[in-house]
Amino acid sequence: MSLAGAIKGVCLVAVGAVAGIGLAVAATHFAYGANFAGLRTESELNRFGLAFERVRDNYLVQPQDRQLVENAIGGMLSDLDAHSSYFDPDTFAAMETKAAGAYGGIGVVISIKDGNVKVVSVVQSTPAFRGGVEVGDELVSIDGVPMHGHSLDDVSTRMRGTIGTDVRLTLARASEAKPIDVRLTREAIEVERLTWRAEGDVGYIKIVAFSDRTEPDLRKAVADLRRQIGPSIKGYVIDLRNNGGGVLQASIDVADDFLDSGEIVSVRGRTPQSMERYDAHPGDITDGKPLVVLINGGTASASEIVAGALQDLHRATILGTLSFGKGSVQTVMPLDNGAGGALHMTTARYYTPSGRSIQVTGIVPDIYVSGGPGAPEYEREAELPHHLEAEGPPAKPLGAPIEPAPGHAYLDFQLSMALSFLHKSLAVSERAPDHA
C-alpha cells in the first residue's frame, strides 16, 4: 500500500469510528516514520480528538457521542461547497428510496429566492394537495422552525420523513392577512411520473425529475403520442422547467434517446484518470423529429445535462430562461454500508459536448422567453454560499426576453412560444428551395 493510500485509510477509519482515532493514527505514525504529510494529518486528527473529548466532558448537557461525530462530519463537508453534505442514516435511507422513485413526504415542489421558500407546484392526490397548499405560498416554518435562509436540501429533508408521521407547515399567502398553519401526515409519495399529451400535431412531454423509471416512461410517451397524433406529428416539446435533476444515468439515457451519435456529457474529477465520457448510441426514438426543450431557473443538474447535450449537438432548440447553473457531480459514499449514514460529496464537474462547464453560468436558451406575469423567481447556483466558481469564458449575454403582448392572457406563455416556433420553423423549412 502506498503512503497516500495508508493516509486515506486512516481518514476513513477516523470518520467511521472516532473511538479508534488514536490507535489508527499511532499505527500510521510508527509504520511510516516521520513523513511530513503523515505528521500533519496525525496532528490535525489529534486536534479533532482533543476537541471531541473537551466537548463531551465539559458541555453543559451530556452530548451523545454519535451526534457529536455526525455534526463534525456535516460541518467538514458543508463548508467545502454548496452541495457537499452528510446524510445521517435515516436521511440516507430516504434518499435511496427517492432515487428508486418513491419517498415519504407531502407532495410539493419548492424553490428558494433571497432566502424565501416558495411552493412552485403541488402534486395531485397528495397530503399537500388535499390540505390546501397552493402554488405561490411562502413556506415560513416547518414544525415551528423558521425556514428563511435554509438551503433547498435542508427544507426538502425537513418535509420528508417516516410515513404516517405529521409535519406542521406555516404558510404565508398573498390573499390572507395572517399566516396559515397546516398539519399534514406524510405518505409514500411516488416521484411524479413523466406526463405527456398531444398539443394539436405536436407531442408535449414533461419530465419532472430523473429517476430509474424516467427513460422507460419517455419511450412509452413517444410511442403513445405517435399513435395518438399519427404520421402528421410535427415534433416534440420536452419540458424540463422546475426539474431539479436526479439520477445522472437517467439523464444520460434520456439524452441518448434523442440522439444517434456524439458525446452526451463528460465527467472530470480531480485527476486525469477520473475522467468519464458518455456517448450516444444509434437510435433516435423520435426518428429525428424537431425538438424544443423548455428550461427555466428551476432547471438544474441532470436536466441541464440533457439540455446542454441537445443544444451543443444541434438536436434541439432551447427556449425559456437561464437555467440554475449546477455543473458539479456528487457521489454518495455510504459509511458502514449505510449504518453510519453517507457522505454526499462533490467529486467532479460535468462538461457538455463542446467542452463547456455550465457551473454558475447555466444553460443560456437559444430563444429567451419570459415566464410571463407571476412566474416564480429562482435562487441560482451563483447565489449559494460556498459555490464552486465558473470555468472557461463567460456565457453569452441573454439580451431582452420575449414578453407576452400587453392585454393577452396565456395559460403558459413559454409553451405557446415553443409550439409557435415549431410550426413556423417547419413552415420555413418546407418552403426552402431544394439546392440538390
Image (cartoon, rainbow, N blue to C red):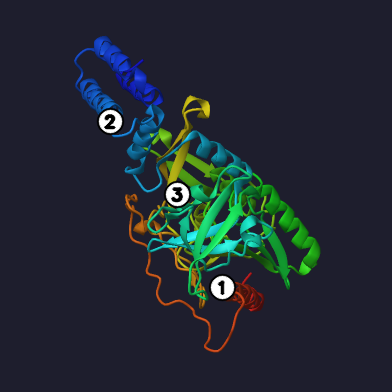
Q: Secondary structure at mark 2?
A: helix
Residue drawn at x 35%, y 17% as measured from the top left: 20
Q: Pointer 3: what residue?
A: 154
Residue 358 or residue 7, whichever sits in front: 7
Q: Nearer the viewer, residue 242 or 362?
A: 242
Q: Where is mark 2, residue-wise?
A: 55
Question: Badges 2 and 3: C-beta atoms under 8 Å apart?
Answer: no
Label 2 with label 1: CB-CB less than 8 Å: no
Q: Quadrant of the N terminus?
A: top left
Q: CA distance from mark 2 to mark 3?
A: 26 Å
Residue labelled with disc 1? 414
1 or 3: mark nearer the eye: 3
Q: Using the image as rendered, state which of residue 316 and residue 299 is in the foreground.
A: 299
Expressed as whole percent of the image width and height from the top left, the position of residue 156 reads 50, 51
| Residue 373 in sight | yes
Say few, some or many: other residues with alpha carbon within 10 Å of mark 2 (under 14 / 14 to 19 / 20 or more): some
Q: Which residue in the rendered view is the most extreme toward the top?
A: 31
Whether residue 313 is visible: no
Taking 141 as reference, is 199 above or below it?
Answer: below
Mark sitting earlier along the chain (1/3)? 3
Disc 1 residue type? Gln
Q: Are marks 1 and 3 in contact (CB under 8 Å)?
A: no
Element assignment for label 1: helix
